[in-house]
Amino acid sequence: MFTIPFQRPLILAAASLALVTGTACAAQAAVSHTPVSAPVTALQSSNCGIGGIGGAGGEGGKGGEGGKGGQPGQPGEPGKPGGTACLGFGDLPDKPKSELTVVDKVRIVLTVMAADDSKDMKNKIADKYKITTEQIDTWKKQYLDGDWFALMSGSAA
Protein backbone atom coordinates (compact mmCIF):
# COMPACT_ATOMS: atom_id res chain seq x y z
CA MET A 1 0.00 0.00 0.00
CA PHE A 2 2.72 2.49 0.95
CA THR A 3 5.72 2.46 -1.37
CA ILE A 4 7.91 4.84 0.62
CA PRO A 5 8.50 3.86 4.29
CA PHE A 6 8.00 7.37 5.74
CA GLN A 7 4.55 7.97 4.15
CA ARG A 8 2.58 6.03 6.76
CA PRO A 9 3.91 8.01 9.78
CA LEU A 10 3.28 11.27 7.92
CA ILE A 11 -0.30 10.30 7.09
CA LEU A 12 -0.94 9.21 10.70
CA ALA A 13 0.56 12.47 12.00
CA ALA A 14 -1.59 14.52 9.62
CA ALA A 15 -4.73 12.62 10.65
CA SER A 16 -3.90 13.11 14.34
CA LEU A 17 -3.33 16.83 13.81
CA ALA A 18 -6.66 17.13 11.98
CA LEU A 19 -8.45 15.32 14.81
CA VAL A 20 -6.88 17.53 17.50
CA THR A 21 -7.60 20.71 15.54
CA GLY A 22 -11.21 19.70 14.94
CA THR A 23 -11.72 18.88 18.62
CA ALA A 24 -10.17 22.20 19.73
CA CYS A 25 -12.33 24.17 17.29
CA ALA A 26 -15.47 22.38 18.43
CA ALA A 27 -14.65 23.05 22.08
CA GLN A 28 -14.01 26.72 21.40
CA ALA A 29 -17.22 27.04 19.39
CA ALA A 30 -19.16 25.76 22.40
CA VAL A 31 -17.84 28.59 24.60
CA SER A 32 -20.04 31.69 24.67
CA HIS A 33 -18.25 34.82 23.54
CA THR A 34 -20.87 37.16 24.95
CA PRO A 35 -19.17 39.82 27.05
CA VAL A 36 -19.89 39.53 30.76
CA SER A 37 -20.59 43.23 31.00
CA ALA A 38 -23.29 43.16 28.31
CA PRO A 39 -25.88 45.86 28.94
CA VAL A 40 -28.93 44.63 30.78
CA THR A 41 -30.92 47.84 30.84
CA ALA A 42 -33.58 46.39 28.54
CA LEU A 43 -34.30 43.49 30.91
CA GLN A 44 -36.45 45.13 33.54
CA SER A 45 -39.54 44.03 35.40
CA SER A 46 -41.79 46.05 33.09
CA ASN A 47 -40.55 43.94 30.17
CA CYS A 48 -41.73 40.70 31.69
CA GLY A 49 -44.62 39.27 29.74
CA ILE A 50 -47.36 37.10 31.16
CA GLY A 51 -45.54 34.74 33.47
CA GLY A 52 -42.20 36.14 32.27
CA ILE A 53 -42.53 34.31 28.95
CA GLY A 54 -42.58 37.26 26.54
CA GLY A 55 -44.76 39.92 25.03
CA ALA A 56 -47.47 39.65 22.42
CA GLY A 57 -46.28 39.58 18.84
CA GLY A 58 -47.35 41.87 16.03
CA GLU A 59 -50.11 41.35 13.49
CA GLY A 60 -49.29 38.91 10.70
CA GLY A 61 -49.07 39.95 7.06
CA LYS A 62 -51.93 39.76 4.59
CA GLY A 63 -51.62 37.19 1.83
CA GLY A 64 -51.57 38.18 -1.80
CA GLU A 65 -54.42 37.58 -4.23
CA GLY A 66 -53.96 35.43 -7.32
CA GLY A 67 -50.18 35.25 -7.23
CA LYS A 68 -49.65 38.89 -6.26
CA GLY A 69 -47.34 39.73 -3.38
CA GLY A 70 -48.90 40.28 0.02
CA GLN A 71 -48.35 43.05 2.57
CA PRO A 72 -45.76 42.58 5.31
CA GLY A 73 -46.87 42.13 8.91
CA GLN A 74 -46.58 44.80 11.57
CA PRO A 75 -44.15 44.55 14.47
CA GLY A 76 -45.30 44.30 18.08
CA GLU A 77 -45.61 47.37 20.28
CA PRO A 78 -42.30 49.27 20.21
CA GLY A 79 -40.66 49.59 23.59
CA LYS A 80 -42.55 46.64 25.08
CA PRO A 81 -40.69 43.51 24.04
CA GLY A 82 -41.05 40.21 25.78
CA GLY A 83 -38.22 39.56 28.19
CA THR A 84 -36.00 36.64 29.00
CA ALA A 85 -35.76 37.64 32.62
CA CYS A 86 -37.55 39.73 35.19
CA LEU A 87 -35.10 42.00 36.93
CA GLY A 88 -37.20 44.12 39.27
CA PHE A 89 -37.10 44.36 43.05
CA GLY A 90 -40.39 42.46 43.36
CA ASP A 91 -38.92 39.57 41.37
CA LEU A 92 -36.13 38.86 43.86
CA PRO A 93 -36.43 35.73 46.02
CA ASP A 94 -37.80 35.96 49.55
CA LYS A 95 -35.01 34.17 51.41
CA PRO A 96 -32.65 35.05 54.22
CA LYS A 97 -29.05 35.84 53.23
CA SER A 98 -27.86 32.44 54.45
CA GLU A 99 -30.08 30.68 51.88
CA LEU A 100 -29.06 32.75 48.83
CA THR A 101 -27.60 30.67 46.01
CA VAL A 102 -25.16 31.80 43.33
CA VAL A 103 -28.11 32.26 40.99
CA ASP A 104 -29.83 34.50 43.55
CA LYS A 105 -26.67 36.59 43.96
CA VAL A 106 -26.33 37.01 40.19
CA ARG A 107 -30.00 37.95 39.97
CA ILE A 108 -29.43 40.60 42.66
CA VAL A 109 -26.40 41.96 40.77
CA LEU A 110 -28.31 42.09 37.47
CA THR A 111 -31.25 43.79 39.17
CA VAL A 112 -28.92 46.49 40.50
CA MET A 113 -27.27 46.88 37.09
CA ALA A 114 -30.63 47.15 35.32
CA ALA A 115 -32.10 49.68 37.75
CA ASP A 116 -32.56 53.30 36.73
CA ASP A 117 -31.28 54.39 40.17
CA SER A 118 -28.77 51.72 41.16
CA LYS A 119 -27.92 53.39 44.48
CA ASP A 120 -31.56 53.38 45.59
CA MET A 121 -32.03 49.79 44.37
CA LYS A 122 -28.86 48.71 46.20
CA ASN A 123 -30.17 50.25 49.44
CA LYS A 124 -33.54 48.50 49.06
CA ILE A 125 -31.87 45.15 48.43
CA ALA A 126 -29.46 45.64 51.33
CA ASP A 127 -32.44 46.30 53.64
CA LYS A 128 -34.33 43.29 52.32
CA TYR A 129 -31.48 40.80 52.84
CA LYS A 130 -29.90 42.58 55.83
CA ILE A 131 -26.54 42.96 54.07
CA THR A 132 -24.33 45.96 53.32
CA THR A 133 -24.22 47.75 50.00
CA GLU A 134 -20.51 46.92 49.96
CA GLN A 135 -21.46 43.21 49.90
CA ILE A 136 -23.57 43.85 46.79
CA ASP A 137 -20.65 45.75 45.22
CA THR A 138 -18.39 42.77 46.00
CA TRP A 139 -20.85 40.37 44.34
CA LYS A 140 -21.04 42.70 41.33
CA LYS A 141 -17.25 42.80 41.00
CA GLN A 142 -17.06 39.00 41.34
CA TYR A 143 -19.76 38.61 38.68
CA LEU A 144 -18.10 41.01 36.24
CA ASP A 145 -14.71 39.35 36.81
CA GLY A 146 -16.25 35.89 36.30
CA ASP A 147 -15.07 34.81 39.77
CA TRP A 148 -17.75 32.15 40.29
CA PHE A 149 -15.92 30.39 43.11
CA ALA A 150 -15.90 33.58 45.17
CA LEU A 151 -19.61 34.04 44.46
CA MET A 152 -20.27 30.48 45.66
CA SER A 153 -18.58 31.05 49.00
CA GLY A 154 -21.21 31.31 51.70
CA SER A 155 -23.98 30.27 49.31
CA ALA A 156 -26.67 27.72 50.05
CA ALA A 157 -26.24 24.38 48.30
Image: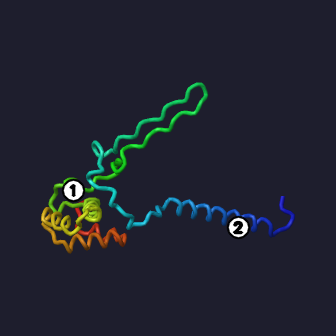
Q: Element under label 2?
A: helix
Q: CA distance from mark 1 to mark 2?
A: 55 Å
Of residues 96 and 113, the one drawn nearer to the viewer in this rendering: 113
Q: Amino acid at mark 1?
A: Leu
Image quarter where the C terminus lies is bottom left
- According to the picture, the residue beneath numbered tag 1 turns out to be 92
Residue at image location 28% in from the left, 66% down from the top:
152
Of residues 82 and 13, the one drawn nearer to the viewer in this rendering: 82
Residue at image location 42% in from the left, 43% down from the top:
75
Crowding at mark 2 (Cα within 10 Å: few <14, some 14-19, many 20+): few
- First in residue order: circle 1 vs circle 2: 2
> Residue 28 at x, y = what percent?
53, 63
7 left or right, relative to 82: right
Q: Is residue 95 above or below residue 139?
A: above
Q: Point out which mark residue 13 bears.
A: 2
> Residue 126 at x, y = what percent?
16, 67
Crowding at mark 1 (Cα within 10 Å: few <14, some 14-19, many 20+): some
Which is in the foreground here, disc 1 or disc 2? 1
